[in-house]
Amino acid sequence: MSSSELEKLRVKITELDTQLLTFLAKRQQYTNQVAETKIKNQIPVRDQKREEQLLIRLIKEGKKQGLDARYVTQLFHVIIEDSVLNQQALLAARANPGSSLPMNRVAFLGDKGSYSYLATQKYFSRRPGELHEIGCQSFLEIIKKVENKEADYAVLPIENTSSGSINEVYDQLQHTHLSIIGELTHPIKHALLVNQETDVSKIKTLYAHPQVFAQCSHFLAELGNVEVKTCDSTSAAMLKVAELNRDDIAAMGSETGGSLYGLHAIKSNLANQKENHSRFFVVALKPVNVPLQVPAKTTLVMSTVQKPGALVEALMVLRDNKINMTKLESRPMTGNPWEEMFYLDVEGNVQDGPMQQALEELQAMTRYFKVLGCYPSEEINPTKVAAVSALAE
């Protein structure tokens, strides 16, 4: 094939890509109209049966046109997830009139390039208004920015699939009056970032946030005699390496973030667990109203009475009201040795009857009880299609 023939084919592919974008935009307009209907008729955002029927039909149609069933499934999982999140955002905006701001001032850990920065960009890309980023050097500073009304929101990492819960954030939540208004999960892909062309064997010093070192402990063990220097954030580590401009130092962090500092990756996928994700809370001064059509989570903090089985009795309240608990975390009570505060994430909306009943019962039987926030769940689980394997044959 000549270069001119190749170029003609590329032009045709580009034209098709443009048409695909046009069709996707039109599809999004229709899904927004669907959301309007759901608002009027109190219909839940997700309809798993409808989604499964849609996927099966598309897989069969794709097979007729020579497309692999798994390819079609993965493609439409992304499209369905985008549709669900857009509908949830529209419903949330209608349920909270006046909440949209011309500018969203958001405090987060680090600076441009940190994982909190990338999570902030991801979350607010679906929200109206201009984004004003406020980088901070500590979780306490982040909280204070919102409490003092210097920021409208804060984005806080709360747990990681590899290194576990971020206890300092739980401790801050225990003492703040802010409300959790949202969550998101962001993939964490650590890379070895350098400013100059070099080999891994030449690296003498590594800069990173302590959480990154914890998540990449196996890789660090393989490196051997390398000096480890902790930084307040991954962005601070990247900046340090960019400024020093030496071939024997490297930062560990996001390849996307590193590119903002002129760094490039010489090794990727450094985390102990290859499926490495961090979960973030979005907090604000005022709670949000979550429509009942939108899947919701509620985060609670409580201290049980000091008697055998007290925690079990509290958890039985959730079971009896058919409320699913997704997380239970204990933290020491400040000033009360050997006493614990328990943080719980549950699936449910504080406006729903069973949840209201459970909250009333828990409040009556605990020494301390507080709802930290009720917020839309943005973990969109892909619809399972049991027939994929059969349809692929």
Image (cartoon, rainbow, N blue to C red):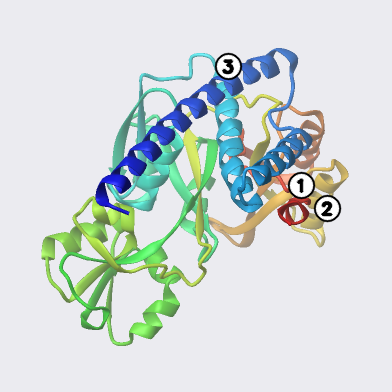
Q: Secondary structure at mark 3?
A: helix
Provide residue 36's location: percent of width, then percent of height.
63, 15
Work out how far the residue at label 2 is from the one at label 1, CA to CA, in angstroms.
15 Å
Which numbered dot is residue 93?
none
Provide residue 144's location: percent of width, then percent of height.
37, 39
The amino acid at mark 2 is: Glu
Q: Badge 3 local density, few (<14 within 10 Å), some, or many (20+)?
A: some
For disc 1, the marked residue is 324
Upstream in the sequence, badge 2 or badge 1? 2
Horizontal side of residue 220 vs 229, given as left or right? right
Provide residue 160's location: percent of width, then percent of height.
51, 59
Q: Confirm whether residue 126 shows in the render.
A: no
- Classify residue 393 by image quadrant: bottom right
Q: Residue furthest right?
A: 320
Q: Confirm whether residue 159 shows in the render.
A: yes
Q: Are marks 3 and 2 in contact (CB under 8 Å)?
A: no
The amino acid at mark 1 is: Asn
Q: Examine the rendered structure and indicate whether residue 12 appears above or below residue 113.
A: above
Q: Examine the rendered structure and indicate whether residue 271 appears above or below residue 258.
A: below
Upstream in the sequence, badge 3 or badge 2? 3
Upstream in the sequence, badge 3 or badge 1? 3
Q: Residue furthest bottom?
A: 225
For disc 2, the marked residue is 313
Which numbered dot is residue 94?
3
Q: Secondary structure at mark 2?
A: helix
Q: Secondary structure at mark 1?
A: loop
Which one is in front in this view, the residue at disc 3 or the one at disc 2?
3
Q: Nearer the viewer, residue 315 or 23?
A: 23
The amino acid at mark 3 is: Arg
- Classify residue 259 by image quadrant: bottom left
